[in-house]
Amino acid sequence: MTQATTAPTRSRKAPRKARKHKGLKITLSVILVLVLAAGGTGWWFWSHLNNNIKGVDINKALGEDRPEKLPTSGQNLLVLGSDSRAGSENKELGGGAGVSGARSDTALVVHIPEGRKKAVAVSIPRDTLVTRPECTKGDGSTMPAKDRVMFNSVYSLVGPACVVKTVEKMSGVRIDHYLEINFAGFKGLVDAIGGVNIDVKEPIHDKKTGLDVDAGPHKFDGTESLKFVRTRYSLSDGTDLSRIGLQQQFLMALLKEVKSQDLLGSPTSAYKIANSATAALTTDEELASLTSLAKFARSMNGVDPDTMETIMLPVEYDKIDRNRVVAVKSRTDALWKAIREDTPIPESAKKSPALGQG
């Protein structure tokens, strides 16, 4: 996990119904789940959950050199799934023997338009080559700008604020909030809801993650779910782009499972889920309390899951290093422009040549 400060304790109740949000990775679902928790469980439970949440001061770290916040731009979140090996559980789950540091294993820019009627999530492949801007590290030293660095290396070298800055520089989109969850948090959340039903599209016999399943329906516990969303090399094309497809499939199944459970009728189950979620959740300082998270989640109450879109950043294989991808400028420019201006995304901007789409 990243270095973080503990958020101040707040005291408000925020019972909520779970709802399905198509296309967001595991981290965003944490917000929707945790606000189920506090109603009727007493001050101790609320205080405990509130103090679980860790916050990082993104705004202070970035300063004023940021994209303009347009009046009609809605809300934009950067959602990261961290592969941090910090702590024994994260190291064991990540297969982290001899692996240090952390990377942004999954990254989504989630755009929630004005009026909260629909939303879109843009997946940024971890192997995308980007220009990292000059950033300030946690110790106050400066990391110079550099071209052609892997997107997921920015997190490990400089931290979450620099990831936000990198995304803002490449997109021109002002990021309003930051959310992150690690391996252990992912596992704990899935186990807390009793596992997730997945229809596996093709046999997976992955030596790297240890997942060994045939095609067909399966119920995965937390450890198996983590293996599923991290599977890459045993897939038909063995690319990270195929893994993004598994992650999107899993999220939809997870949210369906949460929605099917009567969590409001079971305070014990609701608390267990919220405790697992908040213990592994890192947010920007503005969201680093249950009160703030609940208020934000309530603001999304009108989002219609049926209109939710998941889009992969339009990329193509790099001509120098075929193990990396680069953004297709004309398509990504159109994608980011639509998000900045809160307008419909052109169909061409939803297609990625690396997947054989146009």
Image: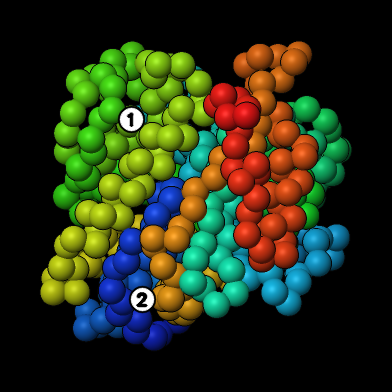
Q: Which amino acid does label 1 sit on?
A: Lys
Please indicate whether residue 298 sits to the left or right of residue 63 in the image: left
Residue 19 can be seen in this image: yes
Tag nearer the camera, 1 or 2 = 1
**Residue at the image point whose x is 71% and y is 43% from the top:** 332
Q: Which colour scheme is used?
A: rainbow
Q: In this view, does 129 lie above or below 269?
A: above
Please indicate whether residue 322 sits to the left or right of residue 143 in the image: left
Q: Where is residue 278 in the image (x, y as percent from the top left)?
A: 38, 61
**SS label for mark 1:** helix
**Residue at the image point whose x is 79% and y is 49% from the top:** 169
Q: Where is residue 287 in the image (x, y as percent from the top left)?
A: 54, 70
Circle 2 crowding by C-alpha within 10 Å: few under 14, some 14–19, many from 20: some
Please indicate whether residue 332 sits to the left or right of residue 49 in the image: right
**Residue at the image point whose x is 33% and y is 49% from the top:** 252
Q: Quadrant of residue 208?
A: top left
**Residue at the image point whose x is 62% and y is 29% from the top:** 358
Name the residue carrying label 1: 227
Q: Which amino acid does label 2 sit on?
A: Ser
Q: Which mark is residue 259?
A: none
Q: Where is residue 217 in the image (x, y as percent from the top left)?
A: 17, 34
Residue positioned most to the bottom: 12
Instruction: Work out whether residue 96 or residue 344 is closer to the camera in this orientation and state it.
Output: 344
Q: Distance between the residues labelled 1 and 2?
A: 33 Å
Q: Where is residue 142 in the image (x, y as percent from the top left)?
A: 84, 43
Instruction: Work out whether residue 230 or residue 354 is closer to the camera in this orientation and state it.
Output: 354
Q: Quadrant of residue 205?
A: top left
Instruction: Work out whether residue 72 or residue 132 is closer to the camera in this orientation and state it.
Output: 72
Q: In which quarter of the image is residue 276?
A: bottom left
Q: In this view, does 300 lie above or below 66?
A: below
Q: Residue 47 carries which label?
A: 2
